[in-house]
Amino acid sequence: MSNLIIRQAASAADMAAIRDLCRDYRQVLVDRLPDRPEILANYYAEADYEALLHALPEKHARPDGAIFVAELDGHVVGCGMTHRVGPETCEIKRVFTAEAARGHGAARQIFAAAMAQAKADGYRVMVLDTLVRLVEAIALYEKLGFTDWEPFYDLPEGFGDLVRFYGKEL
């Protein structure tokens, strides 16, 4: 039987594993959006994305955010992180699980831990954005009670057909 643990990231090794997971996520987007290279160029340009990955600890630092990992049998196989976007609102980002974690409920448990921490931190609302082609992610968000939400940032022109916004009161 596999042992899945959700915990806050605590080490340089955790951050290295998280960066690898985020690179894998970027590759999923490359594979799913071959006809929309402007998405990658705008949100995930390789050099900018690498800089972002190294800034994650600061961007999602306590007390305004948190970084979670899913550990399966001693290996980091999933991640997710939150940060403040308003006085009582946080955003959850970069929830991704490796193939080895699929079917273990890792993403669902990352969300549960992130929502519990956000609520304990005084947030009343959690929001997220996603690409319409990530149908598996959308199904999970809706199962978790997230509903269509007003955009919480301005989309670049021409991106409205690709991005959906969700939110949930905590």
Image (tube, helix red, strand yellow):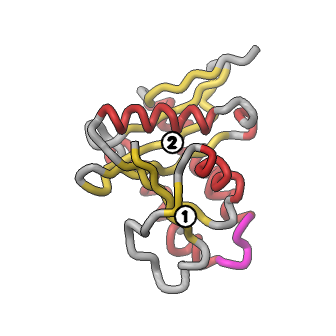
On residue 87, the disc is: none
Position in image of residue 98 (x %, y %): 68, 40
Q: Residue furthest left?
A: 87
Q: Nearer the viewer, mark 2 or mark 1?
A: 2
Q: Residue furthest top?
A: 1
Labels 2 and 1: the sequence-earlier one: 1
- The three-letter code of the residue at mark 2 reads Gly
Name the residue beneath numbered marker 2: 80
Part of the protein shown in magenta: 32-36
Q: Judge whether 75 appears above or below 98 on screen.
A: above
Chief SS of the magenta region: loop
Residue ID at (40%, 42%): 170
* Number of residues whose C-alpha sits closer than 10 Å to that of mark 2, classed few (under 14), some (14–19) or many (20 or more): many
Name the residue beneath numbered marker 1: 46
Number of marks present in the image shown:
2
Q: Is residue 119 left or right of residue 106?
A: left
Residue ID at (52%, 62%): 148
Position in image of residue 27 (x %, y %): 68, 57
Position in image of residue 117 (x %, y %): 38, 33
Spatial CA distance of label 2 from label 1 is 20 Å
- Choose top left, top right, bottom left or bottom right for residue 138: bottom right
Q: Is residue 107 left or right of residue 66?
A: right
